[in-house]
Image (cartoon, rainbow, N blue to C red):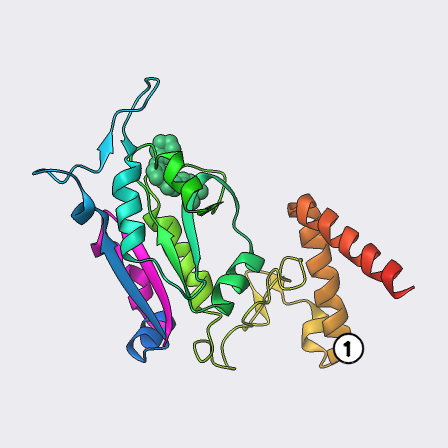
Amino acid sequence: MSWTAAILTLFPEMFPGPLGQSLAGRALDADLWRCETHDLRSFGLGRHKTVDDTPCGGGAGMVMRPDVVDAALASVSRNDGASCVYLTPRGRPLTQADIRRYTAGSGVTLLCGRYEGVDERVLEARSVEQVSIGDYVLSGGETAALVLLDACVRLLPGVMGSAESGVEESFSDGLLEYPHYTRPAEWNGRAVPDVLLSGNHAAIARWRREQSERVTRERRPDLWAAHLSNTTHSSVQEG
Ligand SMILES: CN1CCCC[C@@H]1Cn1ccc2ccc(-c3n[nH]c(N)c3C#N)cc21
């Protein structure tokens, strides 16, 4: 059975969207992964298939009802240990380690919310993982789900050929990737760093590592601190 993304959404037509193109699209066509959408509206209540209601305690907007979301989750409940993930700005940051965990299994169930979000009770009742793709506010969970799926699909066996960019060059060792260059050797008065044209592979590898460390230190002090902690930890462990 191919790695399967079960997506619960009010907008099934948004999937596979951009993931139907390029490498992910070819992988979809080759059944290397599957994209199953489940329309939350079909689990709505009454003649109008209502999925939301006003927030308890007052406030703006609407909240997605727990009974509706629970029925939808029950309809896709999987016994394959697949993670069930709710994309939300209130979630913990999504990491490459999460992506590796999701792709190690048989698939993932993604709950895409709208309005002000989903009633907390169904998320608790079903131990749904709550993750965020970043500290900014989107209109709903669907675009976040597409981001998560893109990160997953590229790691699946057979999707990224050996000729493609490194499957996990960024973040694989907790550092940001080094800067990239290509032809022409000089452009707009700017030259490619000499070391990259030297043919000295050891020097190139050293330069790239130094650049990764510099970029991480400058742009992501959080990742840099974690990297230092991990490298210090492992060196102590090695004795
Ligand atoms: C705007 N509107 C009122 C304020 C709260 C959010 C809401 C919209 N909205 C509804 C469901 C839903 C799910 C994910 C996200 C989301 N935003 N930013 C992220 N990193 C996200 C993730 N992952 C936004 C969502």
**Looking at the image, can residue 197 be seen?**
yes
Closest to the observer: 179 or 133? 133
When asked about the image quadrant of residue 64, the answer is top left
Q: Give the range drawn in magenta.
A: 1-22
Residue beneath label 1, please?
202
Residue for point 50% across, 81% down: 163
**Looking at the image, can residue 138 be seen?**
no
Closest to the observer: 129 or 27? 129
Closest to the observer: 104 or 185? 104
Residue for point 39% across, 49% down: 144
Residue for point 68% across, 76% down: 197
Please check the rendered image and state whether residue 7 is part of the magenta-colored stretch, yes or no.
Answer: yes
Residue 237 at x, y percent in the picture: 86, 61
Whether residue 177 is situated above or below residue 220 in the rendered picture: below
Whether residue 184 is situated above or below residue 63 in the rendered picture: below
Please check the rendered image and state whether residue 217 is part of the magenta-colored stretch, yes or no.
Answer: no
Whether residue 17 is situated above or below residue 183 in the rendered picture: above
